[in-house]
Image: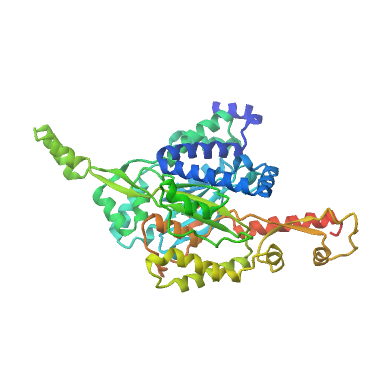
Amino acid sequence: MLDLVFSYMTLQHFISTDDTRTLFSKAMSTMYQKEVPQYGTLVDLVNDVNTEVLKADKRLHDQLEQGDQLARIGLERHGAIRVGTAYELSTLRRLFAVMGMQAVGYYDLSIANVPVHSTAFRPVKGEALAQNPFRIFTSLLRLELIENVDLRAQAQEILDNREIFTPLCLTLIDQFEQVGGLTPEQATQFVKEALFTFKWHHDATVTEQTYRALRQAHPLIADVVCFRGPHINHLTPRTLDIDAIQQQMPRYGIEPKQTIEGPPRRDCPILLRQTSFMALSEKINFKESASAQGLQAYVAKGVQASEVTQAATEQGTHTARFGEVEQRGIALTQAGRKLYDDLLAQVRLQMQGTPKDDYALTYSKVLSEVFKQFPDDWQALQQQGLGFFYASPNLECLPQKPVPRDSTWHQLIAGGYVCFEPITYEDFLPVSAAGIFQSNLGLENREKNDVAASNQQSFHEALGAKVQNEFEWYAALEENSILQTKRALGVV
Ligand code: OOG
Ligand code: NI
């Protein structure tokens, strides 16, 4: 109660949720660079490439400078975690709300036999995105996809008995919800406590035997179930030239995944391109099995200590953590997205049977060839309704040409009264995400599993809320800009 009174008194001193998010993303980056030094190397490479690009492209440099984006260019754009229960997912929803992040989009990864469905927690207001667009791609394990009933029950029990949030973190979330904000001191504390949830733990919570059984069912299940919490599995800075990153990774001593996910390189970038370095194989310790515990009892009875240590510290390796880069383009309408998906399907068809050794090279050739069917010109994208654009009045032509009365929207465009600027895609792509999952779990590309029907409703139930539809979000931005443009031109 005292706490509450205190907070009401300091109502005017709340930190903005955007600032809390920035504190959090910076702290997360520092933690992850310490945990995974190769990620630090990737960040260096990203900064080197971005510097080169900006040196060579004065226009881009000035444009970013004007938009006040230059200093933030190499900052992380997203990260990803995987959780196991409805409680964990719904509490994360509340945790991310403290940082101004909401669930947008539903991604069904069972299309590629990855037993999760996902959303992204991200800022949704324009200014918030501009200030810090940090998002977390969050996946929920679909335990119902574990076929073995006993194993499923065992996984459920392990998950039900873990608590991934610290008590203070939960208290601060309550506090935020009750009074509508946190003081800067509370936010600092919140970030420290929240970070604990995303931290890596070398010690698995299960025996080697359980780990192996779950991993056998699917490597992702072992990753979600066998640890204290949903360790952050990658962070992703923005690059201005993803092809250069892919090419230069080996020179920096890091191994890239085989291909860049998403569309090919284009004059007018669309959606999202991503690549990553291969996940590391890391040492972990398993919980002692009953037999190892038994051996420990022998120690007391004078058995050689060396024999016991060998049995008691059962070690293994786990592969989950990596680093990624992303480069974003224009958000596509449903029609644009359908064309994109159709072209990707054509690529997949043409790639069938390609030998492993030729895969990467052939893939990039086929991808560029097939995507010639996707218009690569801003005006065509706008006119054909394939992309989302911000409209604004063309202030240059107005003084010479007054707007004819009763003009329709199309007449305004044809008359040159309207400017269009692409709206950036802020979300994810299920096929790309599946590719990222697969290369980092050491999986072959697997075909769709028919049993695993998409289940958005059960995801909403677990989340305790509905995700925002990303297409509606972009459409609203576009519509709003059209309305304002009409108003400015006096033709509402
Ligand atoms: C998430 C993979 C998806 C992306 O950028 O598409 C993702 C994961 O591996 O948990 O992060
Ligand atoms: Ni990612």
Front position in the image: 139 or 24: 24
Against 18, residue 384 (above or below) is below
Q: Quadrant of the N terminus?
A: top right
Q: How many marks?
A: 0
Work out whether residue 87 can be spotted: no
Residue 127: x percent and y percent? 67, 44
Q: In percent of the image, x 65 and y 57: which residue is there?
A: 474
User: The C terminus appears in which quarter of the rendering?
Assistant: bottom right
**Residue most toward the left?**
302
Vertical comparison of 266 with 313: above or below: below
Whether residue 260 sits left or right of residue 391 in the image: it is left
Q: Position of residue 7 (x, y in %)?
A: 59, 29
Q: Nearer the viewer, residue 74 or 47?
A: 47
Judge whether 409 appears above or below 158 on screen.
below
In this orientation, which residue lies closer to the viewer: 90 or 454?
A: 454
Res 323 visible: yes
Left/right of residue 134 with respect to residue 287 in the rendered view: right
The percent position of residue 43, horizontal first and vertical second, equals 49, 43
Camera-side residue: 385 or 325?
325
Q: Residue furthest front?
A: 56
* Residue appearing at x 64%, y 65% in the figure: 376
In the rendered image, residue 370, in percent from the top left (x then y), is placed at 55, 71
